[in-house]
Every structure is written in C-alpha cells, then in structure tokens.
Amino acid sequence: MKQTQLIGFADMMTQSRKIKSQFFAQINELVDWRPISNIINKHYQKGMSVDGRPSYDGLLLFKMSLLQTWYGLSDYEVEDRLNDSLSFSRFVGLSLDKTSPDHSVLSSFRTELTQKAVYEKLFKELNKQLEKHKIIIKTGAIVDASITPSPLKPKGKATYQITEDRSEVEPTLEENQKEQKAVELLKIVQPGVDTEASWVKKAGKLQYGFKKHVVSDNEGMAIGVLTTTAKVNEISNLEEVLATADLPNGIGLFADKGYASAKNRELLKSKKMKDRILKRAIKEKPLTDREKQFNKLAGKVRYKIERVFGSIKRWFNSEKARYRGLAKTHTQHLMEAMAYNLYRSPGIVMSNRKI
C-alpha cells in the first residue's frame, strides 16, 4: 500500500514538472524574444561584473523577473530557485556551468529599467506580438481599478485627509495643502513609511497604498496600465488611463458606475468610442427598465476585467506592493500584467485552434 502511494506521488510530481516545462516551452515558442532583447539592450548598461567578466544578459534578467512574478518570489527566492531548477534555468537560458545572478543584480536591473521607463516599452512589444497571434483582439475595451496596499504605512491614526474611494467630490486646494504638510512631517517622524502612497477608505475600511488602473480587451487581456496613489478617483482620470492603451476608434468602452459622469461620457464621444459605462441612479431618479437592461447586458462583458485583478492575486500571490514608491510599484503592476497575459496565452491559442 505504501509503495503504491509513493509511486502515485512520484507520478504526480513528474507530471507537475512536465506541465511546468511544457508551459515554458510554449512561451518560448510563442514569443519572439529578439525585439524584447533589443529594447532591453538599448537601455540597460550591463558593464562588467565585480570579477571582470561580462555581466548577465538583460533578457535573462527579464525572464528571471517573469519567473519571479509567476511564482510570487522575492529576489532572494528566485535566485535560489534558478540554481535548483533545471526548467527555470532552461527557460532563462542559463547554462549548467553558471550560477544564477545575485539578487542584487536583479534589483539593480529593475531599478535601472524603472528609471528609464523601459517596462512600458516591453509591455507594448509583448502585447503587439499577442495581437499578431490574435490572443489580444481590440474589438472592445474594459476599464477598472484596484487598490494595491503598501506594507510601509504610517503607524497610529492618520492625521490628514482620507479620500472616500469613488467619491464624486474632489479635495479642495486647502485640503490638498494640509495633506502635503502632513506628508512632509511624516517623512521626518516615520522615515520607514512610503510617503508616495496615500490613504483611501473603501467599503468602510482604511487602506494605504497605490491604485492600479487597467484597460483590457473584451476578454480581459491587459492592454493598458496606469499607477497612481490610492486616493486618486477613477471618475477624474479616465482620459489618462485610456491613453495607456492604443485603442481603435468605434469600439465600446465598458466600465462600472464609478466612471459614470457627464465629463467621461463626453470624453468617449470625442474619442468616437461607444459609451458602455453602466448607468447610475441619482437621487429621486431611479433607473428605468431600459437602463437596468443595459446594465445587465454591459455587465456580462464588464465583469471580465475583475478576473484580471483576482487572478493576479491568486495565481501570483500578489496581495501588496513589493517595493517602495510609485515608480517601482508601477513596474510591479506592468510585470504582473505581462505575466498574466503570457500565463493565459497558451490556453487561448489552443482554444483558437479548436474553433
């Protein structure tokens, strides 16, 4: 009985390794890494390592970053896994006679590419390839936002303005000035706090961090990403969010009631986009039966973007900001979007072949 159990466990582990190796092979077959490598090499200065040998290739470090995102690993953990896993080494192109790049190399790589806004270029290049394979199809678009909490939050009670998430009331100039003074004081009193994040109240609970705004196609593939502090209201920055995605004219834009405003509806008209923002009931004016039916039909498409946020959290163990500051948190969001799109791609390819 024990022997049978051991054999069954061994078979399960072997199958798990096959699935992982098969996925990596599918990604390497799907993606043309040459333009990705060219973008990285244009901006990443490799130089020489401490012992005088050429440092690690930028594409290897980028693939290492993908593994880190897919498996929810820290810089230290992905370094160890790369040394221990043959499938990891094969995927990044690390020969057996070489050790994994040190965690500090990966950190420096991320910092340099963040400062030069390279991750935006990599995201667009990967998506261009996915469009070519008909994995991303821009027949429509969906927009939504999600809070990314920061663990580097102030201790004790907040002494400055708390924004209510999706409130239609914008802070006054006086309120913003008061908050800025409190933030400056916070830098002195609590130096470990990420002062680029902000407070927001969502569903009655306070959260401190950033906000990830995502544009997807109608099937929930990420095609645009914007990162702001948590207090930024979606109703006020739709134009900035849409600018992150190269959207064709004439398509519909789906969004929840948090984006419903006369300004946003006029914006969609000016961009020749079909207005699929859910209708919002206002005081003493409930929704008509027709508006309720519209919301029901639009909601069948709009909900797909919620899977983007939920799947990234579940699949990649991404519950919070991994880094300090707005720029690096944006890098995290872009890496998650790229990892998510690639993770779904083999299944979409297989589904398209069956049609």
Image (cartoon, rainbow, N blue to C red):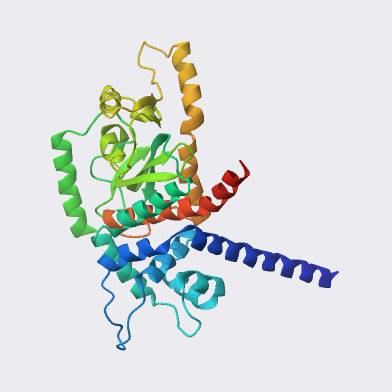
Residue drawn at 83 percent across, 69 percent down: 4
Vertical side of 354 occupied by 302: above or below? above
Decide if residue 86 is on the left or right side of residue 65.
right
Residue 203 visible? The answer is no
Residue 286 visible? The answer is yes
Residue drawn at 40 percent across, 50 percent down: 127
Q: Position of residue 280 (x, y in %)?
A: 38, 21
Which residue occupies the extreme bottom position in the image? 51
Residue drawn at 50 percent across, 74 percent down: 89
Q: Position of residue 208 (x, y in %)?
A: 33, 48
Q: Position of residue 94 (x, y in %)?
A: 46, 77
**As rendered, which of 48 and 138 lies closer to the eye?**
138
Residue drawn at 38 percent across, 30 percent down: 251
Which residue occupies the extreme right position in the image? 1
Q: State the image quarter where residue 1 is shown.
A: bottom right
Quarter containing the C terminus: top right
Vertical side of 227 occupied by 193: above or below? below
**As rendered, which of 306 and 194 lies closer to the eye?**
306
Q: How many callouts does the rendering have?
A: 0
